Amino acid sequence: MRCDGVIKYNVIEKNKDNGIVCAGRENYTRIEKNQSISSNRRSGIKALEGASISIVKNKINSNFA
């Protein structure tokens, strides 16, 4: 099954693990125009298991992984 999700216009901060996780071969999620992806304990954005994600025009900083 294919996933074409869009994660847009969010503030993703201070998570105890990863901020965003996308997994699976048919995962084509777009992550765009988020105001802040920061201060997450691990990765700000993590792609697993063959996910083909697009990351465009985000403010990403100070993640700790």
Image (cartoon, helix red, strand yellow):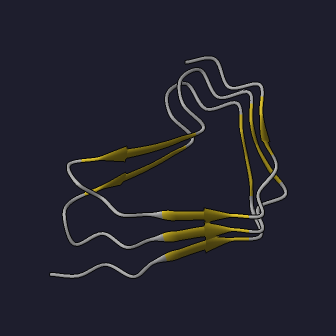
Judge whether 6 appears above or below 23 on screen: below
Residue 64 is situated, as x and y percent measured from the top left of the image, at 63, 17
When asked about the image quadrant of residue 8, the answer is bottom right
Residue drawn 57% across and 41% down? 19
Judge whether 58 appears above or below 38 on screen: below
Residue lying at the far left of the rendered structure? 1
Residue drawn 77% across and 68% down? 33
- Lateral position of residue 49 relative to residue 33, left or right: left
Residue drawn 77% across and 70% down? 9
Residue 32 is situated, as x and y percent measured from the top left of the image, at 68, 69
Judge whether 2 appears above or below 16 on screen: below
When asked about the image quadrant of residue 50, the answer is bottom left
- Lateral position of residue 65 relative to residue 25, left or right: right
- Lateral position of residue 23 relative to residue 57, left or right: left
Judge whether 55 appears above or below 5 on screen: above
Give the quadrant of the C terminus.
top right
Residue 57 is situated, as x and y percent measured from the top left of the image, at 77, 64
Give the quadrant of the N terminus.
bottom left
Report the label total: 0
Nearest the camera: 18 or 65? 65
Residue drawn 54% across and 31% down? 43
